[in-house]
Amino acid sequence: LVHTKGGDVPGKIDTGKRKHRAGIGLQMRMLLDRSYKNVIREPNLLKAGIIQNTIIGILIGLIYLQLTYTQRGTIYLPNKEISFDIISGIQDRLGSLFFAATFMMFAGILGPFYLFPTERKIFLFQQRDGLYSTLTYYVAKLMAEVPNFLITNILFGTIFYWMANLKPDVCTNE
């Protein structure tokens, strides 16, 4: 029973649980198909991602330009001075890798939101009608963006890796 001004009348109470009309497999297949088509229709997103990742790769590469492998260290004792080579830039290298990984992670997570304003009306209408869940929609959008994500992040990683002088050779024992 639903309580109204006129008294208790029978009615449907919205519990917040929604029943979707299609199974999760069909939802995912249809949303993936639509998402892939939208990605193909917007080649400027890939171009913008390439330009963005190139510029940011160069900027981060300039910040961490040519990190060294060793550093001269000196300990001053009362009677003598001890000089030695220490592994340098461990914190610099960890900081650079953290910064690069954080950039790539957020670029991948936020990628599907670029086209969302153009799809907003359709999404709200179909989601309200119970055609698919929000989670299914977002996962399909993420999966459709994977090829663009891989291309742009490989480009970013290549630029950053060589500018930061991380490890030029597999067999380097420096």
Image (cartoon, rainbow, N blue to C red):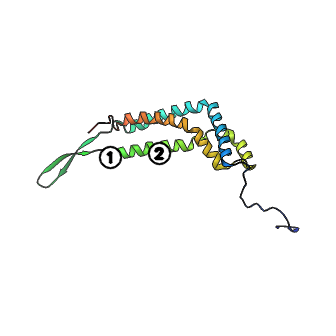
Are dots 1 and 2 in contact, CB under 8 Å?
A: no
Q: Is residue 163 above or below residue 82?
A: above
Residue at (20, 48) in percent of width and height: 74
Residue 157 falls in image quadrant: top left
- The residue closer to the viewer here, 58 or 119, is 119
Percent x, y of residue 14: 76, 60
Q: Amino acid at mark 1?
A: Ile
| Location of residue 37 in the rendering, given as x and y in whole percent from the top left corner | 65, 34
Rendering coords of residue 95 (x, y %): 39, 46
Q: Amino acid at mark 2?
A: Thr
Residue at point 58% right, 33% down?
Answer: 45
Circle 2 sits in a helix, a strand or a loop, which is it? helix
Q: Is residue 52 left or right of residue 123?
A: left
Classed neighbour count for the residue bearing mark 2: other residues with Cα under 10 Å, few (<14), some (14–19), many (≥20)? few
User: Residue 93 sits in which quadrant?
Assistant: top left
Q: Element type at marker 1?
A: helix
Residue under label 2, please give it. Answer: 102
Q: Give the camera-side residue of 158 and 67.
A: 158
Residue at the spot 33% in from the left edge and 37% down from the top edge: 167
Figure quadrant of the N terminus: bottom right
Coordinates of residue 10 in the picture (x, y in percent) = 85, 65
Q: Is residue 43 left or right of residue 66?
A: right
Q: CA distance from mark 1 to mark 2?
A: 18 Å
Give the answer, above or below, for where 44 lies relative to 137: above
Q: Nearer the viewer, residue 60 or 31?
A: 31
Q: Which residue is located at x 49 percent, y 35 percent? A: 53
Work out which quarter of the rendered image holds the C terminus and state it.
top left
**Residue on which disc 1 sits:** 90
